[in-house]
Image: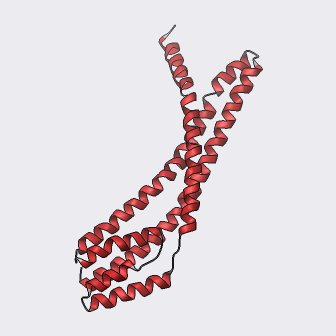
């Protein structure tokens, strides 16, 4: 056996050995994407963005800061009722505002931006990796399928083609769900960051930071 034949055989054995891990990972991605879909629907049902209510609360914050009433401004922050990210940011920053720890409020807004980006990573990874695994699951069985075809073994050909088509469908299914969730959540988090930045701008404007 020549070195080239040995290399080809090694690559073929290695690629064939990847089939079962690919199928396992694809199955896991399907379950993860369905879990993400459930979390998405739960998050959607709880989203309550009210721009008028936010504006009223921000006016109270502005008025309180004009008279150096940091305690009153902190209470106005606690009364903000928006989407989860904005509401929790307001609650956490209220204590910093009362303590007049303004750099901590700016740092907190950056932490929330990182948290939103991390939240998007889950579905972004699925939408990218699932088609790759689906393609691997399509190409790997084609080798045994072609061997079966050359030997007239139609059963082996049919089984490997079924695996190839199934992995493609599963990969695209997971990627499709993840892509849609990523796009919608990105818009949601842009809205949330817009509201957080608005609150932060008011605080920084009135404190001279």
Q: Is residue 2 above or below residue 179?
A: above
Return the x and y of residue 74 as percentages of the image width and height: 31, 80
Return the x and y of residue 169 as percentages of the image width and height: 67, 42
Whether residue 193 is visible here, answered yes or no, is no
Q: Residue at x 69, y 24 (%)?
A: 145
In the figure, residue 199 lies in which quadrant? bottom left
In the picture, the quarter occupied by the C terminus is bottom left
Return the x and y of residue 80 as percentages of the image width and height: 42, 79
Question: Is 118 displayed left or right of 4 in the figure?
Answer: left
In the figure, residue 196 lies in which quadrant? bottom left
Q: Residue at x 24, y 88 (%)?
A: 68
Whether residue 41 is visible here, answered yes or no, is yes
Q: Residue at x 26, y 88 (%)?
A: 69
Q: Residue at x 41, y 84 (%)?
A: 57
How many numbered tags mark residues here? 0
Return the x and y of residue 118 as percentages of the image width and height: 42, 56
Q: Is residue 26 above or below residue 192?
A: above
Q: Is residue 50 above or below residue 143?
A: below
């Amino acid at each position: 056996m020549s070195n080239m034949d040995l290399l080809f055989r090694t690559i073929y054995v290695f690629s064939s050995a990847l089939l079962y891990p690919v199928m396992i990972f694809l199955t896991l991605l399907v379950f993860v994407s369905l879990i993400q879909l459930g979390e998405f629907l739960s998050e959607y049902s709880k989203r309550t963005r009210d721009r008028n209510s936010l504006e009223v609360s921000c006016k109270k914050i502005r008025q309180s800061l004009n008279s150096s009433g940091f305690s009153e401004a902190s209470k106005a922050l606690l009364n903000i009722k928006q989407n989860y990210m904005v509401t929790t940011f307001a609650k956490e920053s209220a204590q910093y505002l009362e303590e007049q720890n303004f750099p901590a409020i700016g740092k907190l807004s950056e932490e929330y931006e990182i948290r939103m980006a991390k939240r998007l990573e889950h579905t972004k990874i699925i939408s990218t990796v699932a088609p790759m695994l689906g393609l691997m699951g399509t190409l790997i069985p084609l080798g045994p399928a072609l061997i079966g075809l050359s030997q007239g073994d139609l059963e082996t050909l049919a089984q490997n083609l079924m695996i190839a088509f199934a992995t493609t469908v599963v990969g695209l299914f997971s990627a499709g769900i993840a892509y849609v969730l990523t796009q919608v959540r990105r818009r949601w988090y842009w809205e949330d960051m817009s509201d957080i930045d608005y609150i932060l701008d008011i605080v920084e404007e009135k404190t001279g930071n």
